[in-house]
Each structure stands twice: as structure tokens, then as C-alpha cells.
Image: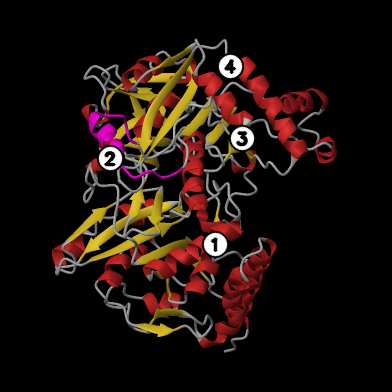
Amino acid sequence: MSTISTKIDEQGHINVGSILEAAAIQLFSSPHTRRGGINIAYELACQQPNTVVTDALMSDVEGVGLFPTNNKILVSITGQDTGRSPWARIVMDKRNADDMEVLTRLIKNVVREMLPMDMLAVRCYFGRSKNAMGECDFLVPSKYAKHALDFIMNFVPASDDARRKYRESKPLGFKNIRVISHPDWVNPDWLAWKNRVNPHDKEQVKHDPEPPRIKMIFDAENNVAFLLGNYYFGECKKGALSLIWSAFLSKGIGMPIHGSSKSLVLPDGKRVSFVTIGLSGSGKSSLGNAYHKEFIEKGWLKDTELGNDDAIVVQMEENETSGLESSLYNKTDEYKPGSFWEKTVQSAENALVIVNQQGQRVPYYMDVYTKNGRCISNRHHLPGADPQRLDTPAPSYICTIQKDNTFGPLTLIEDPYLQAALYITLSTKSTAAENISLAELGKLKISPGANPFGIWPHNKECDVFLQCVNRHKIKGLLLNTGGFFINDEAEIRKEETDIPKELSIILYPLIAANKIKWVDWDMLPGAKIPAPGSMEEFYPGYDKKFVLAKEHRGSHQSLFHARLKWRIDHMEKNSIDEKIIGSLRAALKCSL
């Protein structure tokens, strides 16, 4: 068996490592907890007050184990919480006794509050590989059963085949994943604040800031999470992934990646594998799921094999990138009526539901109701996907998607230390996928590994990333999918040259087929950029848009150096290895 369940040994000892873990077991063992599979979750979800049962049919009923009659798309509405809340995350630290005392008191009150409730507990799996498969247990009040339904469909449903694969998988040496969701919980500190402060009085709020209304509490050592106040399903998915990723990292088994994986198969059968890392809305899924049909028709590629879309682990000792989820949890801004994507939907969240001319209730996506509408899609419909394949070989390239406009559309990173530095200081911009203020949306920020769900130290993550790169001899790519620097005046006006998706999406086939000529980038030792003229055949006008005129290179380098110093400062604050920081310090010594 892959992960470790709770047991009492012959001496009477139980393998429970914390009060948080004991609290989770208490709730799973409650007489009011009903254990069920996907059909029970579906039937209870149909009764959920904030869920609409539509007349639209699900994409794949049989494939996830649902009865033929349980076939309608359900749409849940989550109120103001339509994105993730990384600011609400708390990781338990045994070294801080005072914080531990506060958190354990809070959790005990949560258990007392939840015990009388009718609850639903479900079990599914993460992964399909013998190298990366484990059990996930999820519990939620029955009135929010759609969380349980979506949780099962997002990961790997407990079919006979999945149970067999799990029995045959390697022991991972860490405990089962347990996630408890209590959407109706409200932070008592927030309620007290609300009663004493007028939230519209800026002076009052300035002197008495608003505490978090919701809390996500993680016990990484024992693989338990309590998600308190989360109506948005994305918190459940990412809560489980945080524990899974943390366990792989702490055991040294693999490198956790918030990204997608795929292999491009060349005409001679050789596979060139890519891992794409980026925040939601950055282009990660668009690049990771692109089939590149036109390059197959040209004969440059034989096939494209998709791995996982969002959650992977690069194995340290195996030639494998292991996928953790069987479905896609996608933004719905491209799910037009009648489109390919609309036909893949299994379940939806925060979509508009309308009554059509035939009197049927149907979902309308396209982010009309909210800017972060979501759905669980059947990935098996995607060209290049295989129901049984979530994994790809270890990556030939790891690509970080960044929004730093001092980088061009494509940079090749050959120095492993530089790869680690640019990974741990991945610069990007927030989107509506995050539950943050409008003022923060669109600001350039550092998001290490594009993974705001990490519950581990960044220096540990960076060290393991470097080990992984060296172990598999992985090359790095940096794709800027935002905009490129023009000149000083344009920078003041916040104008830049747009980098279109049509350009970004052709880069992997060009790299795999060895069509790009590279030259050393004089501003960044250890990096290369496309040689002048080498992209014109594939994207006419590339040099005109993305190669700076000589008179603007000085101002560009000044901004580039400022961004490097910003990255270096971040690494110093997070105790990153000096050899990694040194790869960026070397660039500061370069002059034009």
C-alpha cells in the first residue's frame, strides 16, 4: 500500500501524531458521518441549497463511476469567495508553543461544532503511477456535498482498477491525506471585529485591521488540513495538493510542481518532455494542453502525449513526471456555447445558469457571472490525452512562465544555478483566480515556483529543485507571456509590446524539433536567446517587436538590473543558497 492509514499496534499504540490529526479522525468516526462514494455525493449535491441542477448532460458519467441517471451538470454558487485565499493559510509549527495552543483550542471548538452535523466522508486517490499513488480522505457537512463530488472527480475516483493499482503501488512512507471542509465556519475574531469596526471607515480600519474571515490550517507532518469558511472548491483541491506536495518534498521522493507536463514525440520516436510552471491564468494550461496538430501535419512531430494539467511531481530516482489528478479544474473564459471545451464539462462553479427557449436550465460560462468561473472538465477528450496516462518521462525542459517585461518571449537557461534562481523568484501577476483586492490584481510580484499553496520553506524547495535539475540534466526555459519592454517613456505610461499566445504556443515544437538557433545573452550569463533572424520564418516580425534598438538598450538594462536586485533581495530574505543567488549577482556585473 502506498500511504499509511491509522492503526493501533499490538502494544496499544496508535500512530496519531498531533491533536489536529486526532480531531480529523474524531470527525471521520462520528456517528453522524456517512461514508459514501461518488453516487451518494452526487445525489446529496443535487439537494444542496446553493447548487443548481441543470438540464445539460455531463461529459463522461461512466468514466467516473456515476450511475447513468446521475448525469446532469451541477453548478454551485459560492458567494463572494470566487478564488483562492493563500493569505488565510496557517501551517502548524510545533516550535511555537503559544500558536499551537491557540490553534488546537480553535480546532477542538470546530470538532464540537461539527460533530452534531450530518457529514459526508469520501475516499479517492491521487495519481495512477506505481511511484506516486496514495489515498485521499475528504469530509464535509452533507449540505455541501458538491465539494465531495468535485473532490472525487478532480482526483482519481475509487474504481476497481484504481484500487488494484493502489494495492500494487510502492510505499511512499507518509500518511494518508485527510482534508476537512467546514464552509459555514466564521472566524470568531472576525465577527468581533465586524461588531466594533465600521468597515467603510478607513481610519478605523487603519488602526484596527480586518482579521481573516476564513482560515486554512495545515498539519504538514501528519497530512491533515482543516479548511474553515471555504465555499470555493478550489481551496479543497489545493488544500489536498499542498499536503501531497509537502509529503513528497519532505521525504525527498520528488520535486512538487504546480504545472503541466507533456511529451512531444519526434518522427524517430524520441520524446522531448516539457514541464510548464505558471500561475492560473498565465497560459500554463494553454501551453500544456496544446496538441500542435499543425506541426504533426508538417512532419516535425509524430505525436503529442499529454500528462497532467496542474499538479505533478518530478521523481528524483525514476525517469518520470507523475501526474496527481485525473481531471482539469479550468477557468471557463473559453467555454463558448457549442465549443469543444463546453463538451468536456463534468461539473461547474460560479457559472451563469439560464433558461433557454426550450425551457431547459443550461449553464452559460464565459465568466459572465464572475471573473473566475470554474469547471471540472474531462481531460480524456483532449487530443493527446489517454485515460490511463497521467505521467510523462522526466522533463527535458522545465519552463517557467513569467511576466517580467525585461525578458523577451523566450530565454533558454543552461546554468542549473540560474534555473533555480529564476524558479524561486518567478515573477508574475495575480489574476481573478486569487481572492485578493482589486488593487493587487495585475501587479508584478514574486511567486516562488508559481505555487502560492506551498506549506514548506522556500530554501528547502529551491535546494530540491536544483537537485532535480542536476539529477535529470534538465534545461530551463523562461517564457514571458505578458509584454516586452519598449522604452523609458512607454514604461512610465505602462505600455509594452504584447506577446501573443499564438507566438508562445509554437515555441515547444520549435525547440523539440531543434529549429531555433541560439546565441549567448550578454546580459545574463548562463542564458541564451534566439539568434537574430532565427525566428522570422516561424513568426514574421519577431525581431522588429522583440529585439531592442541600440538606443533603448541602456534603459532596458537599467530596469533589468533593478529587477535582478529585487529578485536577489527576495532570495536573501528566504535564506537561499549563496551559489544560487550568485548566478544573478554575476549578471549585475555585465555591461553593454
Tell me how the rendering is colored. Answer: secondary structure
* Residue closest to the far front: 11
Which of labels 3 and 2 is toward the front? 2
Which of disc 2 and disc 4 is earlier in sequence?
4
Which residue shows up at 49% across the image and 20% down it? 28
Left-right relation of 533 to 95 = left
Which of labels 1 and 2 is toward the front? 2
Magenta region = 156-173
Q: In the image, is residue 108 above or below residue 568?
A: above
Real-space CA distance between mark 1 and mark 3, rounded to the nearest whole angstrom: 24 Å
Badge 3 crowding class, 10 Å Cα cut-off, few under 14, some 14 to 19, many 20 or more, is: many
Left-right relation of 6 to 330 = right
Residue under label 3, please give it. Answer: 217
Instruction: Give the amino acid type for the residue marked by disc 1 in the picture.
Output: Cys
Residue under label 1, please give it. Answer: 462
Which residue shows up at 24% across the image and 59% down it? 292
Instruction: Give the amino acid type for the residue marked by disc 4 in the picture.
Output: Met
Badge 1 crowding class, 10 Å Cα cut-off, few under 14, some 14 to 19, many 20 or more, is: many
Residue under label 4, please give it. Answer: 114
